[in-house]
Image (cartoon, rainbow, N blue to C red):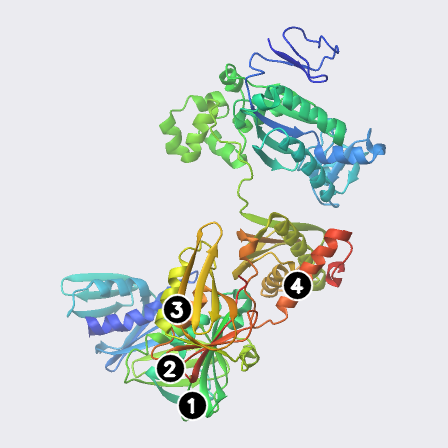
Amino acid sequence: MKLSIERATLLRAVSQAQSVVERRNTIPILANVLIEAEGDTVSFRATDLDIEVVDRAPAQVERAGATTVSAVTLHEIVRKLPDGALVSLTEDGAAGRLTVQAGRSTFQLATLPREDFPVMTATEYAANFSCAAPVLRRLFDKSKFAISTEETRYYLNGVYFHVSEGENGPVLRAVATDGHRLARIDAPLPDGAQEMPGVIVPRKTVGELRKLLDDDEAQIAVSVSETKIRFATPEITLTSKVIDGTFPDYTRVIPMGNTRLMEVDASDFAKAVDRVATVSSERSRAVKMQLDEDRLVLSVNAPDAGNAEEELAVAYGDEKLEIGFNAKYLLEIASQVDRENAVFLFSSPAEPTLMREGSDTSAIYVVMPMRV
Amino acid sequence: MPALCRDCLTSFETGTRCPACRSPRVTAHPELFDLSIAHMDCDAFYASVEKRDNPELRDKPVIIGGGKRGVVSTACYIARIKGVRSAMPMFKALKLCPEAVVVKGRMEVYSEVSRQIRQMMEDMTPAIEPLSLDEAFLDLTGTQRLHGQPPAIMLARLVKRIQAELGITGSIGLSHNKFLAKMASDLDKPRGFSVIGKAETLDFLEARPVGVIWGLGDAGQRALADAGIRTIADLRRWERDALADRFGSQGLRLYDLARGIDHRRVARDRAVKSISNETTFSDDIADVSLLDGHIWRLSEKLSDRAKAKGLAGRTVTLKLKRNDFRLLTRRVTLPDGTQIADRIYRTARGLFDRMDHPKPYRLIGVGISDLLPAAEADREGDLLDPQEAARIAAEQATDKIRAKFGAEAILKGRALR
């Protein structure tokens, strides 16, 4: 194999691939990236056995071929090369070395045979559809904060990506929860997605996917089967296993009958919560909300550390209410609101509270109160 | 030389017998009434409790330990004459002393007696550092004005009182720091009272093997032996920097200890970092429902201890030892802390279910760590488990019933598996 490629192009391709590679590996080949050159394209393939990324880039290929080298080392080298450099990659099969050469710098990297590289098996996908990058970005960005890290509830360690029935017909929906808060985000159902099986997209995949979604104009090809999901742009293909488990029936935990409505400027609210929580030294800081006619008093009482109180003007017309929440959860859901006011719908101090942005029901959040 | 009769607590100046009661149980030492750091160690504690509660055992060799393949946790002095020692495998102990009566330990009783002893210590000083159920450091510095008696007399009174009221004997080590006090209590067991004064500290340590240093295990001793250090005198020949270079911060500690210097304070209630319970089975268990019963009982025990201390844990750990002695531990961190048996059990069971099964196990343990005050735990409900709040309420009601009518008053069916 012998090829030349522009440094910036190479860096972009390799950095996407290397981020999939686990830092601590017991299987040496998994630390490597598979480089395949053919025609006028070079591709970089990396995997942790659950996720596989293939990144293609244009290159001048003099001699087709394939080999594997350490993903992290290759990435570091390319990163440190001067901008605008032309990089050549030459494989010397006999010596088991890949020569990376740019300007006056020459590196020789140990290789492992390409045959040892585990390539993810092909799958028959049940649904293939195309979705604009900003739509997917919204679905995952607004839901991922609620993903559980509790390994015993592995079926919550991802975003449940599925087709559901929204208020105005079928929707593409992302749901995540850790049992304390829940996010449910809807998007119009793209053509061809109707047959998509519901899948739980693992947390790491959600993170890797994010890098494909920065371009507002991009269309992402999505393919879904019972066991795998694939997101593809012309350059990058991200294939991931999905979590083998059943996502709980979240619909029954979304309170539909909450009537006590409070409307507040989300940013003012978040800042006030953050301020009063400062005095608490607890691991999970509890904030008490006291609601009365158009008035919200946020308070924290930490016997050892001190106490704090702040009053906010809100729209609230129901009877008096005292309810406590984990400050972190309140901040997280309040930060999801971009344009309008945050609307909270309460029931009782012991039952889940619902939050949405204005009257928009395409993104709703549920948070469990906390005893204060 | 100041002397003290441990039977009638008379202090006097000369003689090997008490001038008041003629008892030979006399402790005499030039610094006797100047020293105030003590270590109290009960004599064959578990065995003594068993002999107290069952007089038939009094003149028989008694070994406390669990199951046919357990180890000796305590041997009474009669059994010790035959060579039985703590931590010895049971089969070996029984070979040495076939006539021994093996008693399965009753931990609840021992901890109750321990609590009573602790209570008596509290009457003397607030500075108590328990090392286990049957031993503790006491710092009596500055208590002479309060009690009108020097520490030595108060300590002699303590062991006398423990023997009179609880039927347990103990030995006292009195010195000027913890390291030496702990060594002293071991010099004259049982029913001993030994003193290591400042003046004799260096001579006393000189010829002793490094193994007497508390906290220095086999590995530590081997590391020292590799450097040619076998006795404290060997250790003293090393420069401070050389020890630090070779053994790190441990080396600096050894440098001081070899000179009888130990600045550690008697720390009341060292902060608890974790709480755990484990059990070794008499026969390996592979049956999931039997293991499940153990997970529940351990979780419940753990929860009881956490509740008693007012603590909760964010991390739940499950520990399993396979029959090939491989130890497996799995842990998970909860978003909030818990001290509720039901939550600990469900979490531990969740960890168990994520392992490959079934395999025979010889030991199972459950623990919590990353501790926080109970008031800050179990405050967040679970959206996906609406019954959880009800189960927690049921457990708290159960706790109240037990507090009133005893631990057996109400049980979960699961506990009987």
Counting the numbered discs, the total is 4
Q: Secondary structure at mark 2?
A: helix
- The residue lying at 41 percent from left, 55 percent from top is A279
Which residue is under mark 4? B393
Q: Is residue B79 visible?
A: no
Q: Secondary structure at mark 3?
A: strand
Residue B270's x, y, as percent? 54, 40
Which residue is under mark 3? A312
Which residue is under mark 1? A189
Q: Amino acid at mark 3?
A: Leu
Q: Residues within 10 Å of mark 3 (few under 14, many from 20)?
A: some
Disc 2 to disc 1, C-alpha distance: 11 Å
Q: Residues within 10 Å of mark 2 (few under 14, many from 20)?
A: many
Subunit bearing disc 3: A
- In front of the other: label 1 or label 4? 4
Disc 1 to disc 4, C-alpha distance: 44 Å
Q: Secondary structure at mark 4?
A: helix
Residue A343's x, y, as percent? 43, 78
Q: Residues within 10 Å of mark 1 (few under 14, many from 20)?
A: many
Name the side, left or right, on which B92 lies relative to A119: right
Name the side, left or right, on which A281 lies relative to A234: right
Q: Amino acid at mark 1?
A: Leu
Question: Which is nearer the eye, A277 or A237?
Answer: A277
B215, above or below B181, in the image: below
Query: Looking at the rendered structure, which numbered label has been put on residue A136?
Result: 2
Disc 2 to disc 3, C-alpha distance: 35 Å
Residue B319's x, y, as percent? 60, 54
Subunit bearing disc 2: A
Q: Amino acid at mark 4?
A: Ala
Q: Secondary structure at mark 1?
A: loop
Disc 3 to disc 1, C-alpha distance: 39 Å
Disc 4 to disc 2, C-alpha distance: 42 Å
